[in-house]
């Protein structure tokens, strides 16, 4: 059974693409995902998609011209009978894609939102808001990464099904042996404080400059502290700021990593001062690995799963965040993956909702 997923891009920094791949891995062997995208990235997930048996297709950027363009018609005609459903990961695109899909015999269309904003680009916000109006009438099923995202895009709670950015809980089980091995890779001492973060640099919603200022304050009390930033590529701006703050010798810009569970084992506290989020899977992963988490109060409380997570305003000064880190129970590190599973965040359990929709 083929399912065609539409995403804006397949870049390595695209969190939505990571979610799609996680669910792809949780599908039974007879369900395959093909991916269609329209925006090129320097580094992408094509190899990951193809390794799972999926195919990758690119179309021109959807817009008003898509209503009259024959490009999508040509694609669906060429691949007639291959897809049981179309799954659109940008709700505003539903009005452009759903009519074409149904015209060519695809009976099931799902719209899936992953944010609480229409666009980070003010010029595109009005367009996406307008395009989103008919989404609830054109899609057969509305999915949302969380409650707040669903209400933002679809309105009433009755309109949508929450399908969270679930994880493979077993991969994040914490043990002291994993911690020792992970810290040894970087040469960290047993009692050295390691502050951690997972998030891409672009777009700038993760608020990395603020995170670095918080760490500079932490370092005043812990001179040998280190900051691990997975997913974050070093930029001229961030390197310049690191030099200004005097932390360039203890900050690690790790870029995209395939060993995030191991990196989380090396950390002592997870700091996430994001401007805005849909439902950040990295915060769920950090809790599964038993980390205390300090995040901004702009992040939905839906990800507050364990007892060791706090929310703080990003309007507070960095010193306030550093002081809060000092109060977090770093010495109580323990495996929390089972609790995350019990609270409904395991990918194997959540994938059943998608399978039911695809197969019905």
Image (cartoon, helix red, strand yellow):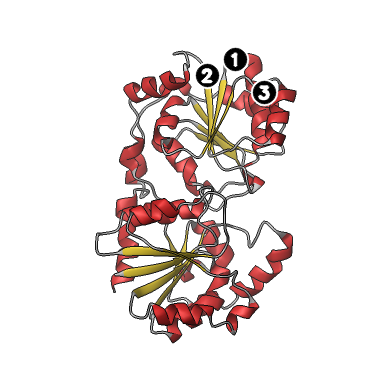
Dot 3 lies on which element? helix
Residue density around tag 1, few if under 14, some if 14–19, many if 20 or more, within 10 Å: some
Residue picked out by circle 1? 222
How far, Cα to Cα, is label 1 from label 2? 7 Å
Residue picked out by circle 2? 193
User: Residue at coordinates 47% horizontally, 22% vertically from top-left?
Assistant: 330
> Which numbered disc covers residue 235?
none
- Mark 1–mark 3 CB contact (< 8 Å): no
207 horizontally vs 106: left or right = right
Occupied quadrant, residue 70: bottom right
- Mark 1–mark 2 CB contact (< 8 Å): yes
Q: Which comes sooner in the sequence, label 1 or label 3?
A: 3
Residue picked out by circle 3? 216
Q: Which comes sooner in the sequence, label 2 or label 3?
A: 2
Dot 2 lies on which element? loop
Residue density around tag 3, few if under 14, some if 14–19, many if 20 or more, within 10 Å: many
Q: Is residue 304 visible?
A: no
């Amino acid at each position: 059974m083929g399912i065609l997923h539409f995403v804006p891009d397949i870049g390595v920094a695209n969190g939505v693409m990571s979610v799609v791949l996680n669910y792809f891995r949780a599908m039974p062997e007879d369900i395959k995902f093909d991916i269609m995208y329209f925006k090129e990235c320097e580094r992408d997930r094509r190899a990951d998609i193809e390794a799972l048996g999926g195919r990758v297709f690119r179309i021109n950027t959807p817009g008003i011209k898509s209503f009259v363009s024959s490009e999508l018609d040509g694609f669906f005609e060429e691949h007639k009978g291959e897809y049981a459903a179309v799954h659109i990961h940008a709700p505003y695109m539903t009005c452009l894609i759903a009519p074409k899909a149904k015209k060519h015999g695809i009976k099931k269309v799902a719209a899936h939102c992953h944010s609480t904003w229409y666009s980070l680009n003010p010029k595109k916000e009005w367009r996406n808001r307008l395009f989103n109006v008919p989404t609830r009438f054109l899609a057969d099923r509305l999915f949302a990464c969380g409650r707040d995202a669903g209400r933002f895009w679809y309105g009433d709670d009755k309109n949508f099904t929450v399908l969270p950015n679930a994880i493979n809980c077993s991969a994040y089980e914490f043990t002291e042996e994993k911690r020792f091995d992970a810290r040894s890779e970087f040469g960290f001492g047993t009692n050295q404080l390691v502050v951690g973060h997972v998030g891409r640099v672009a777009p700038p919603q993760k608020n990395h400059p603020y995170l670095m200022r918080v760490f500079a304050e932490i370092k005043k009390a812990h001179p040998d502290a280190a900051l691990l930033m997975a997913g974050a590529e070093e930029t001229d701006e961030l390197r310049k700021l690191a030099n200004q703050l005097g932390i360039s010798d203890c900050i690690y810009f790790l870029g995209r990593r395939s060993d995030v569970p191991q990196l989380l084992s090396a950390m002592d506290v997870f700091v996430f001062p994001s401007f805005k989020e849909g439902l950040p899977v990295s915060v769920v992963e950090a809790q599964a690995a038993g980390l205390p988490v300090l995040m901004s109060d702009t992040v939905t409380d839906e990800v507050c799963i364990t007892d060791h997570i706090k929310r703080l305003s990003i309007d507070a000064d960095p010193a306030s965040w550093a002081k809060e880190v000092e109060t977090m129970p770093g010495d109580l590190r323990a495996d929390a993956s089972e609790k995350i599973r019990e609270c409904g965040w395991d990918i194997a359990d959540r994938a059943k909702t998608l399978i039911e929709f695809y197969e019905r």
